[in-house]
């Protein structure tokens, strides 16, 4: 799976990380739905850290479409209310 973090880069994540990534994404959605800005900040930071720690950055000359697009680190709680809805940004593993 290829994940792009805006204002950062693209990362290649192993298929066996998809479920864990989806779980963190679901936690971000739950925090947004609950109106919990602190929970959102905590879970969104986990999402970004997971991609950066578990993923391998793509080379600058490697052009591959992204499967998942994640906003930049400074994405606000108000902005998250527009994006982190429903199933979130990461499709469920069975749908991918």
Image (cartoon, grey):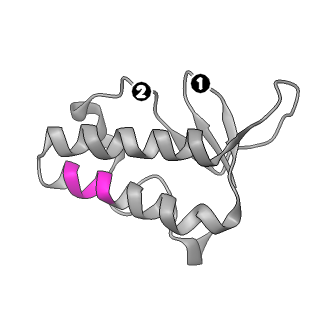
Q: Relative to 3, is 39 on the left or the right?
A: left
Q: Relative to 81, is 62 on the left or the right?
A: right
Task: Give the residue at x 66% y 45%.
Answer: 55
**Does the CB distance between marks 2 and 1 fall below 8 Å?**
yes
Location of the N terminus by quadrant is bottom right
Q: Which residue is mark 2?
A: 73
Q: Relative to 38, is 16 on the left or the right?
A: right
- Does residue 85 show up? no
Q: Is residue 33 above or below residue 55?
A: below
In this rendered view, identify the residue nearer to me: 42 or 31: 42
Provide the residue span drawn in magenta. Answer: 27-32
- Residue 62: quadrant of the picture: top right
Q: Relative to 77, is 71 on the left or the right?
A: right
- Does residue 78 show up? yes
- Mark 2 lies on a secondary structure that is loop
In the image, which disc is placed on residue 8? 1
Residue 9 placement (x, y as % from top left):
65, 28
In this rendered view, identify the residue nearer to me: 30 or 82: 30
Residue 96 placement (x, y as % from top left):
63, 68
Q: Is residue 73 above or below residue 57?
A: above
- Per the model, the C-alpha gap separating discs 2 and 1 is 9 Å
> Magenta includes 21?
no
Task: Give the residue at x 40% y 55%.
Answer: 25
């Amino acid at each position: 799976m290829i994940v792009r973090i805006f204002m950062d880069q693209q990362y290649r994540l192993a298929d066996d990380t998809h479920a864990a990534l989806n779980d963190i994404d679901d936690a971000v959605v739950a925090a947004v739905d609950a109106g919990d800005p602190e929970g959102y900040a905590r879970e969104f930071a986990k999402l970004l850290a997971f991609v950066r720690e578990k993923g391998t950055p793509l080379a600058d000359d490697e052009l591959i479409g992204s499967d998942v697009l994640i906003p930049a680190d400074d994405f606000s709680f108000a902005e998250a209310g527009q994006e982190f809805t429903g199933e979130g940004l990461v499709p469920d593993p069975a749908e991918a």
